[in-house]
Amino acid sequence: MNAIQATVIQDNTASDEALKLGFRNAMSRLGAAVNIVTTDGPGGRTGFAATAVCSISDTPPSLLVCINRNSSAYKPVLANRVLCVNVTADAHQPVCQLFASKTPAAERFALGAWMELETGSLVLEDALEAFDCRVSAVHSSGSHDLLICDVLAMKPRTEGRGLVYFDRAYRVV
């Protein structure tokens, strides 16, 4: 065990709130792609900004999308069981800020040009990539649900610079 691990293990005096704050600060230093996740169907049309998205497999093509159970998008996503992960480009920062805010769901789609693929979830026409998915499994962990999403269709774009979130700010890569 190295010295850093020993320090963390021996320091049990930190309160839960201090640990939570420390964790949030540490996670702000973990750069991540910014995505707009949308859904539409019987549960309603909505969307949210997400950095907790990653690939699972290419056989079958699948993604992991994490959603906070307190999010206004949570119930519609679970009711619809479909979503689209829109990988954002540098020009999408205003759209990302809108989807990350408390703006009513219907007003979030005022910015950007939108279309549909397979599921009816909205696709940002100039996204770097769009993954149109069906939610095949849901697992709970802490404050979030982990959605296992089977990719049904994709819409690529051949040019553009990606948008990431790092150190509590948008950055272009």
Image (cartoon, rainbow, N blue to C red):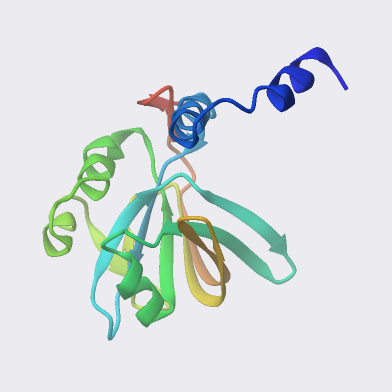
Q: In the displayed orientation, state which residue is furthest to the top.
A: 3
Above or below, 20 relative to 157: above
Indicate the position of residue 129 as horizontal and vertical percent values.
47, 52
Q: Residue at x 66, y 67 (%)?
A: 61
* Left or right: 3, with 144 as reference point: right
Above or below, 14 relative to 76: above
Quarter that holds the N terminus: top right
Q: In the displayed orientation, state which residue is furthest to the front.
A: 13
Above or below, 1 relative to 140: above
Indicate the position of residue 16 as horizontal and vertical percent values.
49, 36
Dividing the picture into quarters, in which one does residue 13 lie? top right
Indicate the position of residue 115 as horizontal and vertical percent values.
29, 67
Which one is nearer the viewer's eye here, 152 or 170?
A: 170
Q: Residue at x 22, y 56 (%)?
A: 113
Q: Is residue 113 visible?
A: yes
Indicate the position of residue 77 as horizontal and vertical percent values.
37, 72
* Left or right: 139, with 172 as reference point: right
Q: In the displayed orientation, state which residue is furthest to the bottom.
A: 42
Q: Residue at x 52, y 56 (%)?
A: 142
Which one is nearer the viewer's eye here, 87 or 167?
A: 167
Q: Residue at x 17, y 55 (%)?
A: 108
Q: Is residue 121 visible?
A: no
Dividing the picture into quarters, in which one does residue 41 lie? bottom left
